[in-house]
């Protein structure tokens, strides 16, 4: 457990508390009952699950020994004296300044005359390094002599280098203020979710990160090394990195270590970033936005400075005024004054904050700079490919990362009495039995037991198949054979129970540069005139890169016309291997059908009507102004919890709490009520995308909105609220003989012992089979539970729901309503008329100024159109896929 933080002045005695050294308690010795006085954010753990087959599983976590003494906490404030406006300085610079403070400028402050309660002789006094997070928090193993107020200011000077022909500019002077903070710590073994405990864990994390953060480029919790990197073009490369975080569990503290990756600016001549083509104003603006704040050095100088902007013209046309009042071009100045003839005088210059303009060809990108902007869309694929490692490869890389971290050689880790076991921990997991699935009448296999999250449609009919009465095909490819291919595939849907009544649909060949909406509208009118009824389905064959066509098709069908649409990728649907069953799983639900259901489940017990909801929020890229966040709440409509409907909204960007949640839940419950559903006795609400730090906000703000919505429609169900997280770094690795074909843990692998929170009700669960790379389990945290579910009930429910994903014969990684909410958020751009030409790219131009950003945001809100009434409740908004397919 974490060390005690030193109490502030006037606090109680500093008793040393229980000794927490060693390996921790033995497995099975941790009691399930949690002491009454212990505070939790969510539900206290009711017990441990017992269902399933028990297996031992390797986790990328390492036992860590922690100190049992006192750690002192200090607030750090660093400012450049000439500014004195508390402008945030880069964390890397802050770390360098703090390290110079304790190593050079004030080393005596960090060489105590008393340590660990003992007065030291002069000869016994040695330097004891402090650790610092680069922002506001520093920690030491002894009390710093900062005077009677426990606060002191220090000044540090940093010399600067000027151009060769000029005198060096005056040094920069920084002021560092250290102030002792007050904190406390509770008994080891019964951790409350309070600031003291969180501060203790933060201190330990800063200790293990101090050495690598000083040596390598880093972000919040990962650092990156150049030993394993790959160029991806455009002046960028990917570096392999290592994530580390200390976390508490029921019987241990452990260090979670994982591999990570980051896009870096490639070291070398800046001019290589140019394509060789002349830049127009738009290209130059995007290049300037890409390069802004990038640090470069100028040939012949060691000083490194960030780029402020780019000049509008080349060096031979960029004119500036010299000190004596005459004017000269940048190219002439370098040739005549600095005796440097430019190779590319017509290429633009970079401009620094000081106003200095330097030809691009003389600038070089400094090594180790993280690209903190959104990754360009064309670089996403190579980044993902670089990040994917098979389980065995990932575990070996993690082991290597522990060697790179060198915790045993870190002065900071040793100073704080910590040590890390180099072997990953092995925890007890359970592989749950899969749920039994039911298919429709006429199936030779009406019931199927998935194997490792997979099954197939062989000899099965849909539970509720639908018919296609009239339909049309639009092909955005020149090949004429596509029409017959599509008809053949659709006719084959009879194998799964569907009936395509129209065997000769109208076929239209179009080009993607025309007005897609007009093309679709004319095709529908033509079909209605010929078939004497409107089409119930539009099938569209998309060319490579036809994303704009897809968006226009979905807007036309889902928002404007109220007709089901199915887009097919041409390069996949033209293959010999049939995809009719993959297509049919999507088309059937869009027409109101049901593919399969759970045979028996706590979710579909008619005696206890249950509604299951899922919610997600999709945010714009960090730093983007004027772009909204998109919200989706999804609800089951039927007693079998397989039919879902979505409510979507637009809200202020980067805001995690769902502002209109009450109205959205009322909207969904009203629709369910109008369909004649019996009033639910239970409401299970899965919330995606919420960090641990935001859990309390969800309880305080979103839960009351769900309760108010239920009251507004006249129902009073017992509510259970569960957070589902996928953005974490826990990975599980099977022991020999226990993995699936991909080398991952099997679907159903559940861990609630030895890895979960010490007091809160949580568990990790792998609900899907592996495909590529190392699978990531979902992390479930139960925040609120009026239904008093046992651990087994909760874990089985969360494992069953991913098998209801209608569009595939594979279970997904998270419960189906959450997966649908995620897809509905991704479909947000389809709610806008494509003719508006709104920008949905994450790398779009950022609005300048709050007024401009607000105006832009309001436009996104006002132009957002609801789903067509004909499509409401037909699961048309759940587009996209968790798996590769010809159908999208």
Image: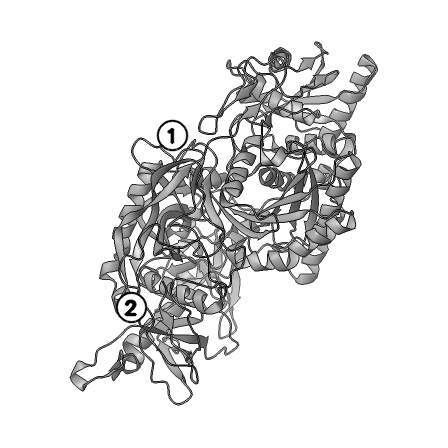
- Image quadrant in which the C terminus is located: top right
Name the image quarter holding residue 588.
Answer: top right
Task: Return the disc, 1 or 2, that comes first in the chain's sequence.
Answer: 2
Where disc 1 sits, the SS reads loop
Name the image quarter holding residue 159.
Answer: bottom left
Name the image quarter holding residue 206.
Answer: bottom left
Closer to the camera in the image, 352 or 679: 679
Distance of label 1 from label 2 (alpha carbons) = 42 Å
Residue placed under numbered mark 1 in the picture? 740
Could you tell me which residue is drawn at 75 percent across and 46 percent down?
715
Q: Is residue 504 above or below residue 281?
A: above
Residue placed under numbered mark 2 in the picture? 416
Q: In the rendering, at what x and y percent does residue 639 appear?
A: 68, 33
- Image quadrant in which the N terminus is located: bottom left
Q: Residues within 10 Å of mark 1 (few under 14, many from 20)?
A: some
- In the rendered structure, the answer to whether residue 813 lies left or right of residue 441 reads left
Could you tell me which residue is drawn at 69 percent across and 49 percent down?
650
Q: In the rendering, at what x and y percent does residue 255 appear?
A: 34, 55
Do the residues bearing badges 1 and 2 touch, measured as CB atoms within 8 Å?
no
Q: Residues within 10 Å of mark 2 (few under 14, many from 20)?
A: many
């Amino acid at each position: 457990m974490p060390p005690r933080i030193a109490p502030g002045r006037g606090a109680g005695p500093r008793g040393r508390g229980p000794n927490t050294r060693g390996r921790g308690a033995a497995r099975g010795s941790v009691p399930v009952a949690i002491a009454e006085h212990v505070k939790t954010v969510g539900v206290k753990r009711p017990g441990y699950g017992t269902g399933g087959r028990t297996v031992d599983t390797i986790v990328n976590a390492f036992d860590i020994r922690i100190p049992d003494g006192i750690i002192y906490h200090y607030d750090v404030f660093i400012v450049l004296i000439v500014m004195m406006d508390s402008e945030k300085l880069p964390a890397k610079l802050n770390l360098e300044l703090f390290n110079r403070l304790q190593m050079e400028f004030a080393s005596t402050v960090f060489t105590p005359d008393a340590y660990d309660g003992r007065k030291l002789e002069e000869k016994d006094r040695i330097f004891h390094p402090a650790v610092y997070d680069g922002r506001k928090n520093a920690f030491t193993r002894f009390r710093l002599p900062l005077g009677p107020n426990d606060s002191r200011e220090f000044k540090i000077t940093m010399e600067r280098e000027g151009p060769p022909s000029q005198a060096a500019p005056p040094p920069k002077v920084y002021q560092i203020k250290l102030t002792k903070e007050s904190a406390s710590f509770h008994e080891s073994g019964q951790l409350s979710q309070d600031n003291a405990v969180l501060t203790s864990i933060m201190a330990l994390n800063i200790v293990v990160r101090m050495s690598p953060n000083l040596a390598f480029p880093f972000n919040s919790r990962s650092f990156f090394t150049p030993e394993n990197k790959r160029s991806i073009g455009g002046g960028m490369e990917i570096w392999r990195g290592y994530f580390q975080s200390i976390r508490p569990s029921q019987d241990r503290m452990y260090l979670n270590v994982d591999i990570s990756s980051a896009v870096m600016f490639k070291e070398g001549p800046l001019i290589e970033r140019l394509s060789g083509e002349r830049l127009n104003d738009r290209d130059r603006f995007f290049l300037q936005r890409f390069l802004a704040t990038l640090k470069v050095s100028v040939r012949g100088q060691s000083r490194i400075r960030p780029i402020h902007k780019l000049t509008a013209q080349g060096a031979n046309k960029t004119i500036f005024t010299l000190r004596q009042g005459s004017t000269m071009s940048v190219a002439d100045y370098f040739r005549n004054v600095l005796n440097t003839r430019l190779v590319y005088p017509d290429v633009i210059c970079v401009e620094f904050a000081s106003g200095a303009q330097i030809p691009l060809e003389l600038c070089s990108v400094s090594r180790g700079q993280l690209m903190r902007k959104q990754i360009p869309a064309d670089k996403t694929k190579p980044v993902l490919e670089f990040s994917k490692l098979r389980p065995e490869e990932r575990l070996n890389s993690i082991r290597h990362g522990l060697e790179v971290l060198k915790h045993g050689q870190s002065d900071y880790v040793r100073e704080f009495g910590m040590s890390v076991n180099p072997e990953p921990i092995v925890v007890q997991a359970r592989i749950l039995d899969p749920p039994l699935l039911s298919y429709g009448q006429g199936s030779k296999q009406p019931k199927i037991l998935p194997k490792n999250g997979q099954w197939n449609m062989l000899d099965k009919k849909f539970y509720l198949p639908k018919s296609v009465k009239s339909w049309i095909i639009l092909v955005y490819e020149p090949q004429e054979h596509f029409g017959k291919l599509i008809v053949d595939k659709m006719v084959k849907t009879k194998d799964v129970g569907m009936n395509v009544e129209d065997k000769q649909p109208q076929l239209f060949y179009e080009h993607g540069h025309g007005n897609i909406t007009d093309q679709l509208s004319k095709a529908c009118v033509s079909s209605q005139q010929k078939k004497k009824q409107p089409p119930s389905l539009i099938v569209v064959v998309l060319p490579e890169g036809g994303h704009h066509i897809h968006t226009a098709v979905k807007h036309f069908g889902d928002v404007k016309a109220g007709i089901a649409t199915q887009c097919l990728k041409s390069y996949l649907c033209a293959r010999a291997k049939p995809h009719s069953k993959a297509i049919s799983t999507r088309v059937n639900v869009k027409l109101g059908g049901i593919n399969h259901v759970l045979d028996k489940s706590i979710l579909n017990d008619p005696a206890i009507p249950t509604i299951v909801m899922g919610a997600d929020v999709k945010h714009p890229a960090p730093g983007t102004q004027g772009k909204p966040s998109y919200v989706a709440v999804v609800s089951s409509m039927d007693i079998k919890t397989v039919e879902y409907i979505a409510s979507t909204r637009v809200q202020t960007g980067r805001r995690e709490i769902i502002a209109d949640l009450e109205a959205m839940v009322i909207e969904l419950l009203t629709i369910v009520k109008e369909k004649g559903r019996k009033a639910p006795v239970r409401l299970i609400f899965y919330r995606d995308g919420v960090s641990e730090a935001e859990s309390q906000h969800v309880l305080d703000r979103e839960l009351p909105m769900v309760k108010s919505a239920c009251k507004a429609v006249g129902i009073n169900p017992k509510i259970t609220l569960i957070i589902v997280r996928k953005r974490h770094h826990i990975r599980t690795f099977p022991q020999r003989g226990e993995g699936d074909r991909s080398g991952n843990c099997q679907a159903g692998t559940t861990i609630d012992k030895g890895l979960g929170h010490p007091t809160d009700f949580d568990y990790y669960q792998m609900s899907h089979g592996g495909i590529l790379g190392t699978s990531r389990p979902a992390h479930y945290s139960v925040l609120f539970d009026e239904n008093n579910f046992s651990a087994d009930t909760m874990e089985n429910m969360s494992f069953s729901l991913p098998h209801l994903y209608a569009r595939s014969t594979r279970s997904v990684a998270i419960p189906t309503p959450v997966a649908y909410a995620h897809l509905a958020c991704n479909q947000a751009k389809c709610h806008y008329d494509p003719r508006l030409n709104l920008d949905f790219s994450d790398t779009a131009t950022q609005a300048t100024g709050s007024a401009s950003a607000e105006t832009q945001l309001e436009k996104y809100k006002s132009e957002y159109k609801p789903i067509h009434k004909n499509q409401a409740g037909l699961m048309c908004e759940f587009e996209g896929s968790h798996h590769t397919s010809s159908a999208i």
